[in-house]
Image: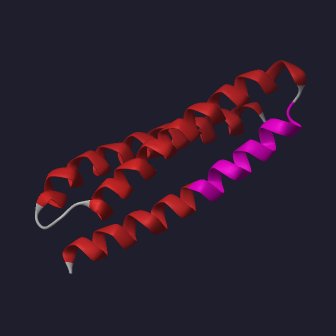
């Protein structure tokens, strides 16, 4: 039960953050030329971190028995890393707006 709850929480969080990344991507596409490249770099970093978190989630889903407890820490670190990058990117985008 704990495993399923944890997986669902991660899926919901990743969907929410994917939507926020989409908003930032749209802002990057509308940015002035001098900022556009910088923003696109930020978006690319976010996408890589999002992919890493998705990979960790798939590993948990594919794990057997209690092995998911070992993988849980990696997922949590990936999520923390993605959230930090998303917060930093959002802050940079706000400052430039």
The correct choice, above or below, for 90 with respect to 95 in the image is below
Residue 86 shown left or right of residue 9 in the figure: right
Between 90 and 95, which is closer to the camera in this rendering? 90
The quadrant in which the C terminus is found is: top right
The correct choice, above or below, for 95 with respect to 8 in the image is above
Residue 27 shown left or right of residue 2 in the figure: right
> Which residue is at a point 56% across and 31% down the rendered structure image?
45
> Which residue is at a point 88% across and 39% down the rendered structure image?
30
Residue 4 shown left or right of residue 58 in the figure: left
> Could you tell me residue 50's position as x and y percent?
50, 45
Between 3 and 43, which is closer to the camera in this rendering? 3
Residue 38 shown left or right of residue 84 in the figure: right
Q: Quadrant of residue 29?
A: top right
The correct choice, above or below, for 52 with respect to 14 in the image is above
The quadrant in which the N terminus is found is: bottom left
> Majority secondary structure of the magenta segment?
helix
> Could you tell me residue 39's position as x and y percent?
72, 29
Between 49 and 42, which is closer to the camera in this rendering? 49
> Magenta residues, as a range?
18-31
């Amino acid at each position: 039960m704990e495993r399923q709850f944890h997986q669902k929480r991660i899926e919901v969080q990743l969907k929410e953050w994917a939507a926020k990344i989409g908003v930032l991507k749209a802002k990057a596409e509308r940015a002035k030329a001098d900022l556009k490249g910088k923003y696109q770099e930020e978006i690319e970093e976010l996408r890589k971190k999002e992919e890493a978190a998705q990979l960790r989630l798939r590993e948990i889903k594919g794990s057997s028995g209690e092995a998911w407890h070992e993988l849980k820490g990696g997922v949590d670190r990936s999520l923390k890393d993605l959230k930090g990058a998303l917060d930093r990117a959002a802050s940079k985008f706000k400052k430039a707006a």
